[in-house]
Amino acid sequence: MVDYSKQNNPLDELIYTQLKNLARKMMSRERANHTLSATDLVHEAFAKLAPSRLSYNDQRHYFHTFARQMRRVLLNHAKQKKAQKNQVEMIYWTESLGLSQTMMIEFDVFNDAIETLEQLDKRSAMAIELVYFTELNQTQAAEVLDVSIATLERDLKFGRVVIHEYIDVQGKNHE
């Protein structure tokens, strides 16, 4: 087992590879001509987390913290681009969240949806982040959250409903 509590040392090669895989998965949902690479995303997230000298309880805490920080990096990048060009940063989202069709949504709207979900149910938000923003499958995510697969599936279902409703309301507000 890798020691996730030693943030003072350079990233271990295994951890670095896992984080780059996570970043690649996150970047695959971004627009094709995005100016950040998966490597940039990992490095920027690490640069923001390293000074805080956080201690990580376990692998779950470590990867959840990094997934959240990488999402914040992408959100900040989207906001900067939007301000520079007065444009909206869109992400390409498919059936992975149970959407009936492929759709493009604003990254900040999606981020706000996850934050709304977190206010309603933190575990459901963590389940969404672990399953959709990391390389973990449902069995692994259930282990990380220390819940049964059935509970994880209920959390994911609730999370998808909240996210869909939030996105639908935001879409109607922009029409």
Image (cartoon, grey):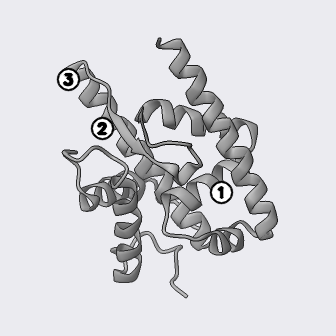
For residue 77, the mark is 2
- Residue 171, labelled with which disc? none
Q: Is residue 55 visible?
A: no
Residue at position x 69%, y 39% in the image? 161
Earlier in the chain: of badge 1 and badge 2, it is: 2
Residue toward you, 22 or 1: 22
Residue highlighted by disc 1: 127
Give the residue number, with chain letter if any, for mark 3.
Answer: 84
Local crowd size for mark 1, using a 10 Å CA cut-off: few (<14), some (14–19), many (≥20): many
- In this view, the residue in front, 103 or 60, is 103
Q: What amino acid does circle 1 point to?
A: Ala
| Distance from the alpha carbon under mark 1 to that under mark 2 | 24 Å
| Residues marked 1 and 3 touching at CB (< 8 Å) | no
Asked whether residue 159 is in view, the answer is yes
- Mark positioned earlier in the residue sequence (3 or 2): 2
Q: Which amino acid lies under the numbered mark 3 shown in the image of this protein?
A: Gln
Residue at point 74% right, 59% down?
A: 153
Percent x, y of residue 165: 65, 30
